Image: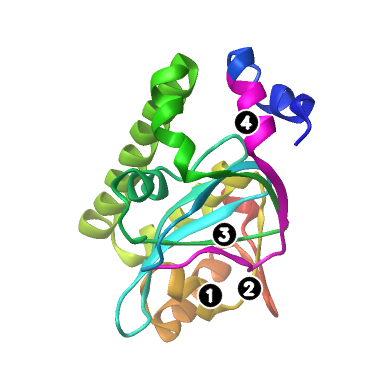
Amino acid sequence: MDEEIVKKRFPFFESGLRSAISEAGTFKEFEAQEELIREDQYIRSFPIVLSGMIKVSRTDEEGNELLLYYLRPGEVCTVSLICCMDRTRSRVKAIAEEVTTAIVVPVELLDSWMTMYQTWKEYVMRSMQMRFDELLNALDSIAFLKMDERLEKFFTNRYRSSGSKIFEGSHQDVALAMNSSREVISRLLKQMEKKGLIHLSRGRIDYSPLC
């Protein structure tokens, strides 16, 4: 792993940590929709995102999906870190939303890095705070917002996460991400299109008017 890549993305890491990441980490590229982490698996390594975007979610026994948050460049999945630290099975799944590059690091280094490198400890704690805030927002949306309001928030949050104004996927994909039915989502999307909030085409949703 080239240390210059680590330094460019994480200039705030101390030099010793950057060297440790470059020595122990592996550069990997994931195709769109490629699964990085499966639910109920033991995690032996964790990704630090360099480019692209990763969707982190949970599913129930019937296959219904609940979107938890997106991982953007420079971020790490703190839920997977917690599973690594506790040596427990993953409670989430992570899938690349688009072509994504990441540094994959063995879990064995987590404990030692937390004590050896102050900037790593600060990075992990800050990531946990961000994820906690996002999970609270997700719960607030489910508890207090109507489905049409949640749908608008889904697109605006996606724009803030990725900068993209286009959703490449079907109505069913949106329904799965929002733990709803395709029929409900299709009806609401058509209503949004009539209001000029989005533009629909086959396998594509342009939500630039919302951004």
Q: Real-space Cα distance between discs 3 and 2?
A: 18 Å
Q: Earlier in the sequence, mark 2 or mark 4?
A: 4
Q: Secondary structure at mark 3?
A: loop
Q: Real-space Cα distance between discs 1 and 2?
A: 6 Å
Q: Earlier in the sequence, mark 3 or mark 2?
A: 2
Q: Earlier in the sequence, mark 1 or mark 3?
A: 1
Q: Which residue is mark 3?
A: 197
Q: Is residue 208 left or right of residue 58?
A: right
In the image, which is nearer the foreground, mark 1 or mark 3? 1
| Quarter of the figure with the N terminus | top right
In the image, which is nearer the foreground, mark 3 or mark 4? 4
Q: Secondary structure at mark 4?
A: helix
**Looking at the picture, does residue 177 appear above or below residue 13?**
below
Q: Which residue is mark 2?
A: 169
Q: 14 or 180: nearer the eye?
A: 14
Q: Which residue is mark 4?
A: 21
Q: Earlier in the sequence, mark 3 or mark 4?
A: 4
Q: Which residue is mark 1?
A: 173
Q: Position of residue 43 (x, y in %)?
A: 44, 56
Q: Real-space Cα distance between discs 4 and 1?
A: 35 Å
Q: 184 or 59: nearer the eye?
A: 59
Residue for point 34% across, 32% down: 129
Q: Position of residue 14 (x, y in %)?
A: 58, 13
**Mark 2 surroundings: few (<14), some (14-19) or many (≥20) residues within 10 A:** few
Q: Is residue 31 left or right of residue 134?
A: right
Q: Is residue 32 magenta?
A: yes
Q: Amino acid at mark 1?
A: Asp
The image quadrant of residue 183 is bottom left
Q: Amino acid at mark 2?
A: Gly
Q: Real-space Cα distance between discs 3 and 4?
A: 44 Å
**Looking at the picture, does residue 11 appear above or below residue 68?**
above
